Amino acid sequence: MKKSLTIILDPGHGMSNRTSGLFDPGAVSGNATEADIAMVWTNDLRAILLAAGHVVIRTRVDHKDPAPVGKRATIARRHNGQIMISFHCNAAAGTAQGTETFYRGESHRELAEKLNSAVCSALWTRNRGAKTESSSQHATLAIMAFQPCFLIELGFIDHADDLRKMTNHTLRKAACNAIAREIESFAGR
């Protein structure tokens, strides 16, 4: 019998993310918001993981669910999570493209690289690599107070090709299946 995992999924941004009572859409391009894209990806990956027999906890379940960024690691610990995946989108005024994954600690570099490559292969996005959280725009990422946590920047919302790929149902499903395989491999399942 395969071992069930407790997996925490974090759709980035949302209600009360940084300011109580205010909705944080994250990066925006036209009608597309980072919070919407992250939620769709979270729900697709959740369905795959649930079908495989895992316990899946989301840090927020919809856009009304308040989820302060500083409390998301606490949610993961409270539910005895074994791994956390946080979905986000980058933005750079249309001048950059590709997928990158942030991690904390050398012991998590290999899985970060595998997760990033899995997403890039499924989405056909440029591989910007796995990077330590200090390589992000912040010295530390609050979500990474829980370990192991992997923050996947799926693509650049303001790059037309990346946005098309991130919002393509078929490509998203393929990427979520690839992420699920890497999570199970990491857990020795």
Image (spheres, rainbow, N blue to C red):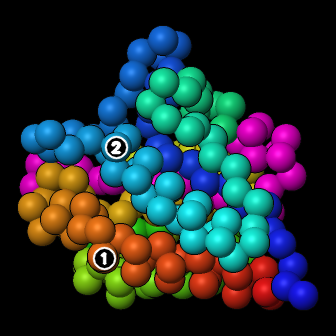
Residue farthest top in this picture: 21
| Residue visible at 65% across and 72% down in the picture | 51
Secondary element at image label 2: helix
Q: Which of 79 and 128 is in front in this view?
A: 79
Above or below — where is 23 with respect to 117? above
Secondary element at image label 1: helix
User: Taking the image as drawn, is residue 96 in sight?
Assistant: no
Q: In which quarter of the image is residue 105?
A: bottom right
| Residue visible at 49% across and 35% down in the picture | 62
Label 1: which residue? 171
Which amino acid type corresponds to the residue marked 2 in the rendered image?
A: Asp
Q: Nearer the viewer, residue 74 or 64?
A: 64
Label 2: which residue? 36
Above or below — where is 23 with respect to 178? above
The boundaries of the magenta stretch are 73-96
User: Taking the image as drawn, is residue 160 in sight?
Assistant: yes
Question: What distance separates the C-alpha of mark 1 from that of mark 2?
Answer: 17 Å
Does the magenta portion include 103?
A: no
* Left or right of 145, for residue 15: left
Q: Nearer the viewer, residue 75 or 167?
A: 167
Within 10 Å of disc 1 (Cα), the crowding (few <14, some 14-19, many 20+) is some
**Residue 19 placement (x, y as % from top left):** 48, 16
Q: Quadrant of residue 147?
A: bottom right
Tally the numbered discs. 2
| Residue visible at 44% across and 48% down in the picture | 39
Within 10 Å of disc 2 (Cα), the crowding (few <14, some 14-19, many 20+) is many
Which amino acid type corresponds to the residue marked 1 in the rendered image?
A: Leu
